[in-house]
Image (tube, grey):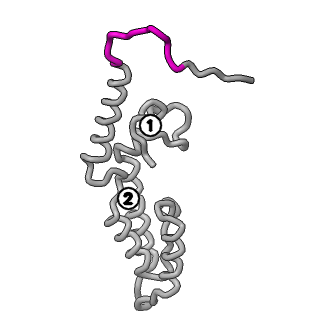
Amino acid sequence: MVFLLPLGVDGATLDRRPWVSVSIAAICAVAFFITWVVPSNPGGVGEGELRELLQETLAHPDLELPTGCTALLSEHGKALLAQLKKEAEAPAWDVDVNALQARLDAHCASVLEARDSGLLNRLGLVPARGLLQWGWLTYMFLHLG
């Protein structure tokens, strides 16, 4: 099987600008600027929010980081969190662990909501959203990852 790639047409001249290519490049530049340069946290979640969440988790060895927030950590971060939880000292016996866990769950929910409401996440292609989403059109202008 032989594939032929056309490299050009001899003697053909084109006296117009490549407006489609220029438009696509301009849309990519504008989308990059709006989603990466303008927002303070392009992903919707900053390092400070994750640090606060981890500090709350380490406040008591019985607290468990919810699975949605655990997914925000890398494999190294998950291993480090497990190691730090083993080394953590238990606070006084009169601490209400259920109240601390409820506060941690609420904080995790607010962090996940901030991540999901970020412009980069809303315009990106997220497989969990299914087939009917704007991401099929807009993801190609974002170049995330």
In the rendered image of this protein, does residue 74 appear above or below residue 56?
above
Residue 67: percent from left, percent from top: 53, 62
Give me the C-alpha separation between circle 2 and circle 1: 23 Å
Residue 3: percent from left, percent from top: 67, 23
Residue depicted at x 49% and y 12%: 9
| Residue 29 appears left or right of 122 | left
In the rendered image of this protein, does residue 6 appear above or below residue 26?
above
- Which labelled disc corresponds to residue 111? 2
In the rendered image of this protein, does residue 33 appear above or below residue 68?
above
Q: Does 17 appear in magenta? A: yes
Q: Amino acid at mark 1?
A: Tyr
Residue depicted at x 55% and y 33%: 131
Ranked by sequence position, the earlier of labels 2 and 1 is: 2
Which quadrant holds residue 75?
bottom right
Instruction: From the image, tell me which residue sits under label 1.
Output: 139
Viewer-side label of 2, 1: 1
> Alpha-carbon neighbours of circle 2 within 10 Å: few (<14), some, or many (≥20)?
many
| Residue 130 appears left or right of 117 | right
- Main SS, magenta region, reads loop
Q: Which residues are magenta?
A: 7-19
Q: Amino acid at mark 2?
A: Val
Is the N terminus in the top left, top right, bottom left or bottom right quadrant?
top right
